[in-house]
Image: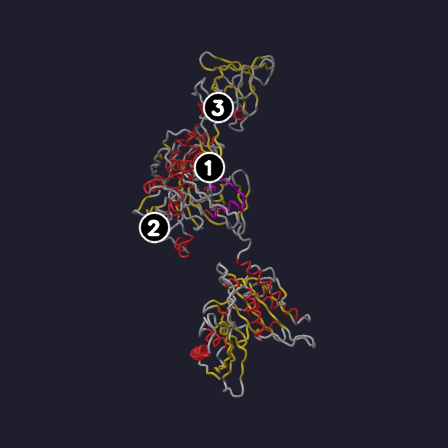
């Protein structure tokens, strides 16, 4: 974004010099990239007048000009420009002047026998343009002998700043002046163009795509002339790198930079029909010729401005060559619209067209400025080009842009790290255009101005008491997406000066490096090693699988389906790694390797995310060999594998319990769930359901287990206690309890252990018996209890009392009787 200092002062009342202005711009987030002042380089060039021009005696295309330099001073110049003539005000370069375009320094010289004491220069030689067809022609009232740069305003510094994508309001000179005024560099001058009462109405609007264009206004101006722009307007445009074209086009470019409001001028005589349409591209295809002669193929998703016959332009991006204003234009139609930023950005990228209008529309414009901008541009057109304006024609309506945001004053310190007072914060917000609402000692609520599209929406109602549907939808998603307060904090800190926020040192770096892996990674590594030592072979498989296979191992949610799978049979995330190794066991069995022991450590998935798991599987009957093992996989083998893994991971085994609520892919009578406490599920084990094993192609018995690694808690760091080595000999006593056949043995063991935790150190099950002398539907459990005395040897009375407590505890808990 470029602007000249004099242009900035049209909006900012200040006494600050250029250095202070540029320093302040960088301090408030509008980073200055360059400052260019051509005044010193152009200072030697003077305004002069050709008194007479005579043909060169020795050259047909040269003239010998006598040039008046002011007062009685004259100079003789040999000139080859075709427009050099007597009475013409020109720009004169005396000897010793450096010419920017050619890089030479002038000297008094002799050309074909005639002495030349200087040079009459063109626009290109001064670096002001590309015109080199003749020397610069000045107005008749140009003051002779005056430095040209000062008279033409070329000693006006030009500043270029970098604009972040969220600051569409800073792509206007008035927006920059507003920020500088808020930062204390003066006052923002008022800007309120008077409304224009039109006398007729000709061209109207019709919005077909209302999502892409919520509001558009326009006005016809009859009987205009379209000469070159006045010198002051051309100088301002040239200073910021724009090429003057004609008055109507230059005026629209002027307001694009002045107030950040892109306008477009159509030659009204080239518009067919009385209505302009804002619509999408024709699905059958259409093209138009853009300004500059480029042909563009309109896409169906583009937004175009069209009359009854043809496309006149890509809305908000670039106009068409056929409807553009030329020197022959006598009736002009002025457009001022509000377009959807996303639509404009996508259209611009699709066609690779970058324009000043696109840069502003895709960042968001002032949603309340349309009518005032149209009036301001109309005033200037009438003043420069003449003409008679019509009434304003419009379609759509002004969006409900009013929204509120609140700032808690203490957050300026806790989040922003600044000691800005509430009064200072409120003044900064007011200077930036935020209208103050309610305020108390803790916070202030403000109305966000129409030009600040970067400040987030809140769920506060607008003036009509209606919450915008898009805002309400965001509010329903969650407050984390709606943070208007942080935007206000940013504005206050930015204007107060980020450099004024006191620096805070980062925490010192410890001399001892942190752990290379976290607890979860360490647990997974230990699990791999422990399972490998128990004879398992590790698998590393895809986390994808066919949806019908995944459904056998759990519920499949839509969130687990892959929208763009790499293969047709990998269209779903697996619920558990057990599904992958079960299919691997089936493939091994199909190839003659039925006896396998496989494990995998990896994620299982559900509708809420993924869970790290360690799963193992044993399949196949015992080998037919007299030296081989005679054991086949069963639920107790899976339980032994799982409990060995838990013990290796440091889980306190005494706190574990087993319940019979394993998932449906386990055998309902030969499976269990391992819990730590009543709620924490550590894993599950058992025989795979026979129907599942048959469905995936495994013959024979299959046992498996699953461990949820994230359920393993990191042990608390404590001082290692000394080894527990009692000096007294332990005592064991055996009990046989008769219980209901459905009673789990674990309930008996826990009841016995809880009878006296200080004395009892171990309780183990050594026998399960059913049959003779045991009633039907019941079973006898043989339990060994270890008593460990610590202070003295136990007497018979002590042992009998402990046994009584054990029997009573088991009887109360399970209804068992002593056999």
Image height of 238 relative to 762, above or below = above
Question: Closer to the camera: disc 2 or disc 1?
Answer: 1
At 58% from the left and 14% from the top, the residue drawn is 109
Question: Closer to the camera: disc 2 or disc 3?
Answer: 3
Question: Closer to the camera: disc 3 or disc 1?
Answer: 1
Q: In terms of secondary structure, where does tag 3 sit?
A: helix
Q: In terms of secondary structure, where does tag 2 sit?
A: loop
For mark 1, does the 10 Å Cα neighbourhood hold few (<14), some (14 to 19), or many (20 or more) residues?
some
Q: Is 594 covered by the magenta stretch?
A: no
Q: Which of the two discs, 3 and 1, labels the residue nearer the N terminus? A: 1
For mark 2, does the 10 Å Cα neighbourhood hold few (<14), some (14 to 19), or many (20 or more) residues?
some
Residue underneath mark 1: 31
Q: Which of the two discs, 2 and 1, labels the residue nearer the N terminus? A: 1
Q: How many marks?
A: 3
Q: Of the numbered discs in the image, which one, if any, rests on residue 40?
A: 3
Rounded to the nearest angstrom, the CA distance separating label 2 from label 3 is 53 Å
- Give left or right: position of 73 versus 695: left
Report which quarter residue 78 is drawn in.
top right
Image height of 63 relative to 544, above or below = above
Please state the extent of the stretch shown in magenta in the rendering. Answer: 342-359
Q: In terms of secondary structure, where does tag 1 sit?
A: loop
For mark 3, does the 10 Å Cα neighbourhood hold few (<14), some (14 to 19), or many (20 or more) residues?
few
- For the rendered model, the colour scheme is secondary structure
Q: Which of the two discs, 2 and 3, labels the residue nearer the N terminus? A: 3
Q: Residue 113 or 807: which is nearer the viewer?
A: 807
Q: Residue 101 or 132: which is nearer the viewer?
A: 101
Residue 265 is situated, as x and y percent measured from the top left of the image, at 45, 38
Residue underneath mark 2: 462
């Amino acid at each position: 974004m470029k602007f000249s200092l004099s242009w900035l002062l049209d909006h900012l009342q200040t006494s600050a010099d250029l250095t202070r202005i540029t320093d302040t711009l960088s301090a408030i987030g509008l980073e200055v990239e360059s400052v260019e002042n051509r005044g010193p380089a152009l200072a030697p060039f003077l305004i002069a007048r050709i008194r007479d021009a005579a043909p060169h005696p020795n050259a047909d295309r040269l003239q010998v000009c006598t040039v008046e330099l002011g007062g009685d001073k004259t100079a003789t110049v040999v000139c080859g420009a075709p427009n050099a003539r007597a009475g013409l005000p020109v720009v004169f370069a005396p000897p010793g002047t450096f010419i920017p375009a050619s890089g030479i320094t002038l000297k008094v010289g002799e050309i074909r026998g005639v002495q030349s004491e200087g040079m009459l220069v063109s626009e290109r030689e001064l670096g002001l343009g590309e015109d080199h067809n003749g020397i610069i022609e000045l107005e008749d009232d140009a003051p002779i002998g005056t430095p040209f740069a000062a008279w033409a305003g070329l000693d006006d510094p030009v500043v270029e700043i970098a604009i972040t994508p969220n600051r569409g309001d800073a792509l206007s000179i008035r927006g920059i002046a507003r920020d500088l005024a808020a930062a204390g560099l003066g006052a923002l001058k008022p800007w309120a163009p008077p409304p224009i009462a039109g006398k007729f109405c000709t061209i109207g609007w019709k919005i077909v795509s209302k999502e892409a264009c919520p509001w558009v206004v326009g006005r016809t101006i009859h009987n205009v002339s379209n000469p070159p722009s006045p010198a002051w307007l051309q100088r301002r445009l040239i200073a910021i790198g724009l090429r003057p074209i004609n008055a109507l086009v230059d005026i629209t470019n002027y307001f694009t930079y002045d107030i950040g409001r892109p306008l477009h001028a159509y030659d009204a005589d080239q518009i067919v029909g009385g209505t302009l349409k804002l619509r999408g591209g024709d699905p059958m295809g259409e093209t138009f010729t853009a300004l500059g002669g480029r042909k563009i193929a309109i896409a169906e998703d583009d937004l175009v401005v069209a009359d009854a016959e043809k496309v006149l332009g890509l809305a908000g991006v670039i106009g068409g060559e056929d409807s553009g204003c030329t020197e022959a234009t006598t009736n002009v139609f002025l457009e001022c619209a509000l377009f959807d930023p996303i639509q404009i950005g996508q259209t611009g990228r699709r066609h690779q067209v970058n324009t000043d209008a696109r840069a502003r529309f895709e960042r968001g414009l002032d949603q309340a400025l349309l009518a005032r901008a149209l009036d301001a541009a109309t005033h200037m057109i009438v003043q420069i080009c003449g003409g008679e304006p019509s009434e304003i024609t419009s379609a759509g309506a002004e969006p409900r842009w009013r929204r509120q945001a609140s700032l808690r004053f203490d957050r300026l310190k806790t989040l922003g790290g600044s000691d800005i007072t509430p009064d200072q914060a409120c003044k900064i917000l007011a200077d930036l255009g935020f209208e103050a609402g309610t305020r108390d000692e803790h916070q202030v609520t403000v109305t966000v101005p129409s030009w600040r599209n970067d400040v987030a929406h809140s769920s506060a109602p607008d003036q009509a008491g209606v919450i915008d549907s898009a805002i309400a939808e965001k509010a329903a998603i969650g407050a984390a997406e709606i943070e208007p307060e942080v935007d206000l904090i940013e504005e206050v800190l930015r204007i107060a000066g980020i450099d004024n926020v006191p620096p805070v040192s980062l925490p010192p770096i410890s001399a001892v490096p942190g752990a290379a892996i976290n607890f979860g990674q360490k647990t997974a590594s230990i699990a791999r090693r422990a399972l490998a030592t128990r004879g398992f072979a590790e698998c590393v498989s895809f986390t994808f699988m066919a949806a019908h296979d995944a459904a056998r191992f759990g519920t499949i949610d839509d969130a687990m389906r892959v929208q763009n799978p790499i293969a047709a049979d990998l269209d779903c995330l697996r619920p558990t790694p057990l599904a992958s190794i079960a299919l691997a066991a089936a493939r091994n069995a199909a190839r003659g390797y039925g006896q396998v022991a496989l494990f995998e450590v990896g994620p299982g998935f559900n509708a809420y995310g993924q869970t790290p798991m360690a799963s193992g599987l044993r399949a196949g009957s015992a080998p037919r060999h007299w030296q081989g093992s005679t054991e086949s996989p069963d639920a107790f083998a899976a339980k032994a594998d799982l409990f060995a893994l838990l013990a290796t991971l440091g889980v306190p085994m005494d706190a574990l319990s087993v319940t019979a609520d394993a998932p449906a892919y386990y055998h309902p009578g030969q499976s269990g769930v391992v819990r730590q406490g009543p709620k924490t599920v550590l894993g599950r084990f058992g025989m795979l359901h026979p129907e599942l094993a048959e469905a995936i192609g495994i013959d024979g018995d299959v046992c498996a287990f699953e461990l949820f690694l994230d359920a393993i808690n990191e042990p608390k760091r404590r001082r290692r206690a000394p080894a527990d080595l009692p000096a007294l000999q332990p005592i064991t006593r055996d009990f046989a309890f008769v219980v209901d056949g459905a009673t789990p043995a674990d309930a008996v063991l826990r009841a016995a252990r809880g009878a006296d935790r200080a004395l009892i150190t171990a309780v183990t099950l050594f026998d399960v018996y059913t049959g003779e002398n045991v009633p039907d539907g019941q079973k006898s459990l043989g339990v060994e209890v270890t008593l460990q005395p610590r202070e003295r040897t136990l007497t018979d009375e002590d042992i009998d009392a402990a046994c009584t407590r054990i029997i009573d505890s088991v009887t109360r808990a399970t209804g068992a009787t002593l056999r």
